Amino acid sequence: MASDTIIGIDLGTTNSEVAILSEGEPEVVREDGEALVPSCVGVDEAGSVIVGRQARNQWAAAPERTVLSIKRLMGTDERVAMGTEEYTPQEISAFILKALRDRAARALGHDVHKAVITVPAYFTDAQRQATREAGEIAGLEVVRIINEPTAAALSYESRSEGSRTILVYDLGGGTFDVSVVAIEEGVVEVLASTGDNRLGGDDFDGFVAARLNGHVESDLGVDGAGDDRVLQARLRRAAEAAKIELSSRPYVRVEEDHVATVAGEAKHLSCELSRIAFEQDVEELLARTMQSVTTALNDADVRPSQLDRILMVGGSTRIPRITQLLAERLGQEPHGEVDPDLCVALGAAVQAGIEMGRDMRAVLVDITPYTFGTSTLGQLYGQPYAHQFVPIIRRNTKLPATRTEAFFTVFAEQEAVEIKVYQGEDPDALKNVEIGSFHFAGLNRRLSAYDEGLLFTYHLDLDGLLKVHAVERATGQEIHGIVENALGRSTGEELAASKERIEGLWDGEAQAEESVDGAPAAEAPPAVARPQLQDILERAERALDTAPDEDREEIASLIARLRAALGEGRDEDAAAIRQNLDEILFYLE
Ligand code: AMP
């Protein structure tokens, strides 16, 4: 039925594609033979909005009326100027989505109202939410948001048989993801995923443009070239074209007429760039992507020799040095049979088919690339600390996931707790990104601090939206919260810094010696947690999810009592409770 048709959309930083099912097979919609729609929006001279190639073509001449790479701003509060108006990132993305929707409608011969849209695995909640909103503005119900590497693997699955372990290396215009994906009997499972949502071909263009600027300034004697927006837009475009050429040739000549006028004389740029120099410029960034490959393999507990395939996604993977580095590191050549530009959109269409109830042979299992948790009074590097990060849903957990943790108030008669929600991997909550905070007031003050305590439950759905639930066990009193756009308040810098720290931790140096001097003073934190008991507590918390109802109650109560005993320094009691817990877990695990 036409109204039930769901299309698959790869909303890329640089290019976007839309795919439909044609006689049951996913197919990317082409117009004039062209599948890629530049993710570029502009207003033309007459004031009409233009999208895709047309907008892309006017960019060099009218950068103030043209917007590129909007995906990088998704999930932020920034507004971009286009012509005389300002727009949110969602609105700009919506123009692109609408163009894709119209394109699909022309191919299908009827209107379309539903879509599956892909996002990088590393996209935060706010970025996913912004993507969903962009769909709504474009008149599309977004039935699912799926991760790009998962989509790539789904497209792959529709053409392969048997079980496979695949590494998906996805380097596009503005984002980088690497994922280890297992495909078994039609089930696609992301075993691990990591990356950098601010790394891609645009950065490489920046290096080439810097070289061109150098030539303009030193060879042609032009001052202040960097302030000339139109010239910069032209050079950036020339830089991208040169970079693409360098993927197939060792040298490229860049010719740009009339880049400036010096002392009444028109200056023309003509210079040669080499692949070797380009590779030197980007070597550090590529090395970072290779570190992420190692991290993803470690997280997935997969050795390079266990990989059946390396799958390349994204236009930037055509850079030969990437193939070389992957082959060196993994001992096998990446495969090129799946088109790196199209496989994500094709996979989105496979998922659309599954949503429409078609037998597509592949079923989706997805994971969270981040850990979500809260902060408690606890310890950091052996010292008491008011903001210990306690993970609730760990990264690489299959989605949808529901996890519950037991906590309790710090003081007798404490009437309220603050439930902070953090995203990140650092044991110090303050070094992670705070994405939400909920005030749970009106607690029963007659209960002692270590009575039955509180249960916090996080539910993370497949679209990456986080629901928080807290209940006071003794009274049944509860609050609900949803973290949707909370990350819109975090700056890109915050995220980037957080990402860097995560990389540091993944590299194996847990910064164990780091001092906590200067840590902020305690401010009525909600709970306690003791790292030396992390193991048994973690096992117990995991068991909370799976235990039969009658055991769950008891486990939660033992967790609370164990924490209480520790908090009050009743070590003997703690040992007894711990043993009790251990026994129950023995039968459950
Ligand atoms: P995507 O986001 O997957 O559409 O990838 C777009 C990025 O791939 C842009 O930065 C392009 O400049 C880049 N790209 C496309 N083709 C090539 C190529 N042959 N060599 C290097 N980069 C490329």
Image (cartoon, grey):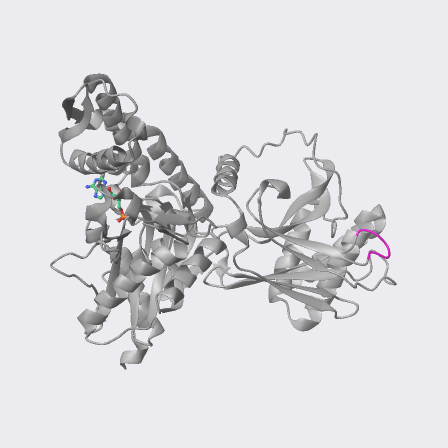
* Residue for point 51% across, 51% down: 488
Q: Quadrant of residue 240?
A: top left
Q: Quadrant of the N terminus?
A: bottom left
User: Residue at 84% across / 45% down in the picture?
Assistant: 569
Q: From what the image shows, is residue 86 above or below residue 346?
A: above
Residue extent of the magenta highlight? 410-414
Q: In the image shown, does 468 or 94 lie closer to the viewer? A: 94
Horizontal arrangement in the rendering, residue 18 relative to residue 31 (left or right)? right
Residue 413 within the segment the image draws in magenta: yes
Res. 466 visible in picture: yes
Residue under the image location 88 percent in, 63 percent down: 446
Taking the image as shown, residue 177 lies to the left or right of residue 323, namely right
Residue placed most toward the observer, 584 or 529: 529
Most common secondary structure along the magenta stretch: loop
Residue 471 locus on image (x, y percent): 71, 65
Q: Is residue 238 left or right of residue 387?
A: left
Q: Residue furthest bottom?
A: 1
Q: Position of residue 157 (x, y in %)?
A: 28, 61
Which quadrant is the C terminus positioned in?
bottom right
Q: Quadrant of residue 455?
A: bottom right
- Residue 143 on the magenta segment: no
Total of numbered circles in the picture?
0
Residue 208 coordinates in the image, percent (x, y) = 25, 30
Q: Is residue 184 visible?
A: no
Residue 85's x, y, as percent? 37, 52
Q: Quadrant of ligand 1?
A: top left
